[in-house]
Amino acid sequence: MDQTSAHALYDRFLRGLARSPQGVAIRVGDASLTYRELHDRALVWAGSLLAALPERPAAVGVLAGKGLDAYTGILACLFTGVPMVPLQPSFPVLRTLQMLEAAGVEALLVDAEAVTALEKLRAEGVTLPALLDGAADGVDGVLAPDPASRLARPHPVAPDDIAYVLFTSGSTGRPKGVPVTHANGAHYFGLLDARYDFGPDDVFSQNFDLNFDCAMFDLFCAWGTGATLVAVPAGAYRDLPGFVAEQGVTVWFSTPSVIGLIRRTGQLTDGALPSLRWSFFAGEAVTCQDVTDWQRAASGSAIENLYGPTELTITITRHHWSPERSPGISVAGVVPIGPVHAGHAWMLLGADGEPDAREGELCVAGPQLTAGYLDPADDAGRFLDRDGARYYRTGDRIRLGEDGQLLYLGRLDQQVQVRGVRIELSEIDEALRRCPGVEDAVTVPVPSEQGITLAAFHTGERVPPVVLARELSRTLPRSVLPQHFFHIAEFPLNSNRKIDRRALLHRALELLGRPH
């Protein structure tokens, strides 16, 4: 292995290849690829793409579902040495267009599942060359992998080169691009290597979509140790214990919402998940009751609550669950998020803009902090320069607990997590205001047994909810569409003459017949 590439994200795969060349790198249903097969296939794809382009692209998009081609595409893109941009085929075409333009994507790696999405992009005037291993009848600009163009080795990268770009919700109505460097990833995964005992006999779940940063945890923790990664299909949740047993899953990672789903279907019985050694949860607040129930089913598993925004490279804190100690230091039954990763500076910023020793907005600086958004205009209000360091303002209200444990108290802004997907409520509001007949709009998060649901209030004409949902689906992912739409003559105002969101929440609970 070339030691000068040790900072490269793809180096983690090369480590797994050296450790387990004939081991299974990725399994999707009945199909799989060994480390050797995936390595060779990705080099062919990478070389074929570069050979077909007049010059090195600024970025390459991977437009694919969670199939073997998607994982080949991700690795192939990294092997080219240019930024990789994972794209979700199910996203509205207009949203994908925004991402392509923001990231400067100049070529695509696609799979059969994404052909329809590619056709929609072509209809919108996107002429980017696209590499596809298979037929795409009637679609222009599609390239096939050519074994003669196989790269001899991955292209070298510098620590500060961008490894991948992920998009988060933006308050202006467009997604914000977050470029993550190889150095960001090297620090993060170096900490994980020292912390966990993952090895080639482990089998990692892959619950997250590939455009979600937590998917990178599964991917590169598994590939960095020669372990197997298993894509979890939606149907697996109907019998999760059966799926986990059949696949031999030893490392589980998902949003806490999965716990509630499995509990409601009666699957969290004593000892139902005996193969799990590690269980990780992130993306939403997880309750002590959730973890207790999961622990009962996975009695041999260590459990950790991970926390971190995309801008801080996947996760930046972790709390190791202790049945004896954790409940006693939790706030309102929510598991602590734990201490900030080593090598980082952090502070709690009070309402007066000054550091507070006990409670405030969590701000973090250090090697996992990304440089800023693709569009520098998006940096305003999210980054803070203080004492010679640049901090990211998470927008999360945190309290300092015992032994340096950080306790999550909620958001300070209008951002919410819906089934692990981060969404700015103002982005939904902005999209609603563009709908014909709508004058103004306000979306509020409504708690339910299934987690957070969204209720949107609007003024103007009485537009049918089905019409609003159809209009929003043109620009917003299905996972963040409001479940409820309510027409209102005018918005309630608080004493400061601002829209009273608390009053709207109470109104939504009343209309839905829920207690408040």
Image (cartoon, helix red, strand yellow):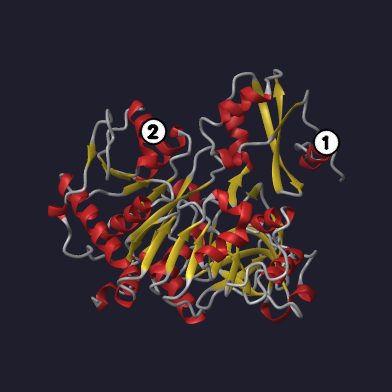
Q: Residues within 10 Å of mark 2 (few under 14, many from 20)?
A: some
Q: Is residue 110 above or below residue 68?
A: above
Instruction: Please state the horizontal and vertical placement of residue 78, each as a whole percent of the image.
Output: 31, 59
At 17% from the left edge and 57% from the top edge, which residue is drawn? 150
193 lies left or right of 345: left
323 lies left or right of 100: right
Q: Is residue 54 above or below residue 462?
A: below
**CA–CA distance in space, label 2 to label 1:** 41 Å
Instruction: Please state the horizontal and vertical placement of residue 343, each as a whole percent of the image.
Output: 50, 77
Which residue is disc 1 drawn over?
507
Q: What kind of residue is marked 1? A: Arg
Instruction: Please state the horizontal and vertical placement of residue 170, each as a whole percent of the image.
Output: 54, 44
Label number found at residue 315: none
Q: What kind of residue is marked 2? A: Thr
Q: Is residue 103 above or below residue 33?
A: above
Q: Which quadrant of the figure has residue 182? A: bottom left
155 lies left or right of 161: left
Counting residues from the N terminus, which is met first, the one under dot 2 or under dot 1? 2
Which residue is disc 2 drawn over?
116
